[in-house]
Image (cartoon, rainbow, N blue to C red):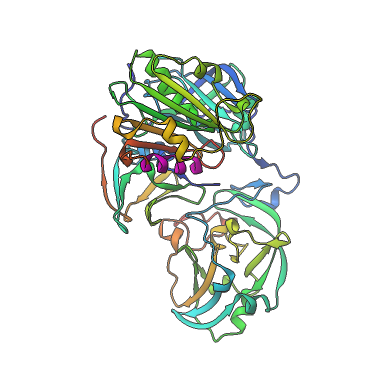
């Protein structure tokens, strides 16, 4: 199964951040590429959801649901800016 | 009035299936009546959740096919090895309940206030959110000029064929059939390439905004092609459905 | 309370008379789901090696032809994924980890598996010895497909399948149990499906 893009985790991002985030601008901490979260490469079939940089493949976000609570690791991101007002 | 970007938690609600429309042999549009729908923006999607008797659950996302203000509808393509799509396209009946939450998405959305010419590129079931955009364009009386290039395997695979065929007033629709064409076919053939895009998309000088949706490989090729034509990357919005046309 | 979706069964099979074989909370599948946290690596066999290391220092290493020349075993095992999929009677061929460790000086109480693509997972040495683990390269009579971990993956069927690391390239022996990739994010350090050890603290 091919990976999807960040649009596919829109619901998960709302659960975690309390806001629509697919339009948020993220900067990869490894290669510096900047772009919308909607453009990230998403691997969802694993024990957790992994979002990777489309340019260099580095892991930017990891979401793991442990006993009903979603934990998120953003250390791969250098920057994550909320999208502008809708 | 379309719903604005959602703040706070998404909650699941139980909608009633109000209508089922077979679009092609493997594609079905499901009309839904949710009890508490906040409205949506063209291009957004919703999440569907199925629960079996023993508690087993499966969740999927589907693009909203209806325009804001119309009865809520999703269009689902049956994937041969799918777990949810065969149920939605073959088992579901009018009157059944369907748990959903939404609307979701703030990036791949179009608002009629944006006056830019629209370049819409659809691969397979990627047409679904673009159809929402086109229907909303009509509903709001927008005169934004639009060009849709729709890539499908065969003519019977084209979803919303009659509806798309009836567009006028500033919408140009062209098709490319990649696998086989009917006798006398005058549209394009083969997968999207630079030449096809150059003829079908708005030129970059028109400052268009593009929405590209479909399987990942289609989106990669089409989006890169638009960038090669001079579209700024931030003016090419993409939504990838994965290998076989549905998330 | 979610309503029951009339007529929905999903992809899983209901095991007839085999319920005792299914660990708690698991569903039986007829397919073989592909689960991954990243793109499938494609290491050419000419570049492939498998190593046993001790705190990073190489104790033994095999090229693909050398690895293929080792004694192998055919095993049929049930496998259990933490995402709740179980599959019965899967057939594999590979080299027992005992065979590999017999050929090197080794000590240490724990191993960390390192894989192409950067994946890691940790296990006690006891759980990869005594006939409990293999480096497998054939599945169901054919070469292991890349999306399922080929050329070779670790196979440790008595633990949740995230411990059966795909694209494995080395086992590092060490003195302390340190969390691998999923363990770092909250999955259980050991992962016994029969005690439903999915998450840390279970």
On screen, residue B6 above or below C175: above
Using the rendered view, name the quadrant where residue B96 is placed. top right
Would residue C133 appear left or right of A6 to someone viewing this image? right
Say if residue B188 shows up in the picture.
yes
Query: Residue B96 versus residue B183: which sits nearer the camera?
Result: B183
Q: Residue at x 33, y 26 (%)?
A: B117
Query: Residue B190 versus residue C11: which sits nearer the camera?
Result: B190
Residue ranking furthest to the bottom: C105
Would residue B88 appear left or right of A14 to someone viewing this image? right
On screen, residue B62 above or below C194: above
Specify start and end residues of the magenta stretch as a single range: B216-228
Residue B31, horizontal then vertical, whole percent: 52, 18
Residue ranking furthest to the right: C17
On screen, residue A22 above or below B165: below
Q: Residue at x 51, y 63 (%)?
A: C190
Residue C52, horizontal then vertical, whole percent: 53, 78
Say if residue B207 shows up in the picture.
no
Residue B122, horizontal then vertical, whole percent: 48, 31
Q: Residue at x 45, y 29 (%)?
A: B46
Query: Residue A23 versus residue C109: which sits nearer the camera?
Result: A23
Using the rendered view, name the quadrant where residue C130 is placed. bottom right
**Magenta-drawn stretch, dominant element (helix, strand or loop):** helix
Residue B147, horizontal then vertical, whole percent: 41, 25
Q: How many marks?
A: 0
Would residue C115 appear left or right of C62 to someone viewing this image? left
Using the rendered view, name the quadrant where residue B119 is placed. top left
On screen, residue B214 above or below C125: above
Can residue C1 be found in the magenta stretch?
no
Can residue B225 be found in the magenta stretch?
yes
């Amino acid at each position: 199964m091919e990976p999807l893009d960040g649009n596919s985790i829109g619901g998960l991002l709302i659960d975690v951040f309390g806001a629509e985030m697919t339009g948020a601008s993220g900067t990869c901490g490894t290669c510096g590429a900047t772009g919308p979260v909607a453009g990230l490469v998403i691997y969802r079939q694993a024990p957790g959801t992994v979002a990777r940089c489309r340019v260099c493949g580095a892991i930017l976000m990891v979401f793991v649901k442990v006993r009903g609570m979603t934990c998120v690791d953003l250390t791969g991101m250098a920057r994550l800016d909320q999208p502008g007002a809708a | 009035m379309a719903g604005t970007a959602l703040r706070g938690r998404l909650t699941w609600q139980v909608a009633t299936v109000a209508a089922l429309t077979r679009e092609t042999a493997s594609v079905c549009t499901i009309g839904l009546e949710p009890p508490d729908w906040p409205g949506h923006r063209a291009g957004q999607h919703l999440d569907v959740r199925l629960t079996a008797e023993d508690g087993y659950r499966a969740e999927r996302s589907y693009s909203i096919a209806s325009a804001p203000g119309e009865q809520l509808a999703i269009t689902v393509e049956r994937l041969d090895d799918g777990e949810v799509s065969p149920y939605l396209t073959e088992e579901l009946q009018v009157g059944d309940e369907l748990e959903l939450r939404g609307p979701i998405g703030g990036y791949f959305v179009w608002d009629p206030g944006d006056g830019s010419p629209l370049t819409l590129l659809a691969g397979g079931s990627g047409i679904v959110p673009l159809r929402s955009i086109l229907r909303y364009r009509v509903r709001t009386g927008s005169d934004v000029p639009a060009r849709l290039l729709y890539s499908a395997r065969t003519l019977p695979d084209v979803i919303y064929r009659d509806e798309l065929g009836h567009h006028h007033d500033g919408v140009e629709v062209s098709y490319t059939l990649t696998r086989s064409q009917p006798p006398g076919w005058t549209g394009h053939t083969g997968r999207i390439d630079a030449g096809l895009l150059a003829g079908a998309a708005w030129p970059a000088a028109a400052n268009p905004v593009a929405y590209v949706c479909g399987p990942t490989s289609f989106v990669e090729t089409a989006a890169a092609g638009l960038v090669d034509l001079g579209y700024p990357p931030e003016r090419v919005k993409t939504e990838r459905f994965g290998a076989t046309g549905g998330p | 309370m979610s309503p029951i979706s009339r007529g929905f069964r999903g992809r899983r099979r209901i095991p007839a008379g085999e319920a005792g074989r299914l660990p708690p909370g698991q569903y039986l599948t007829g397919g073989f789901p592909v689960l991954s946290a990243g793109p499938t690596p494609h290491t050419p066999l000419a570049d492939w090696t498998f190593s046993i290391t001790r705190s990073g220092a190489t104790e033994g290493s095999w090229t693909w032809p050398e690895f293929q020349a080792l004694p192998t075993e055919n095993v049929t095992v049930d496998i259990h994924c933490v995402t709740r999929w179980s599959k019965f009677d899967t057939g594999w061929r590979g080299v027992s980890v005992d065979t590999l460790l017999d050929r090197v000086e080794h000590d240490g109480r724990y191993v960390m598996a390192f894989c192409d693509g950067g994946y890691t997972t940790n296990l006690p040495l006891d759980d990869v010895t005594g006939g409990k683990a293999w480096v497998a390269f054939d599945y169901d009579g054919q070469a292991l497909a890349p999306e399922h971990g080929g050329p070779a993956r670790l196979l440790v069927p008595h633990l949740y399948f995230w411990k059966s690391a795909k694209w494995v390239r080395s086992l590092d022996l060490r003195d302390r149990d340190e969390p691998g990739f999923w363990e770092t994010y909250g999955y259980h350090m050991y992962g016994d499906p029969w005690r439903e050890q999915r998450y840390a603290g279970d």
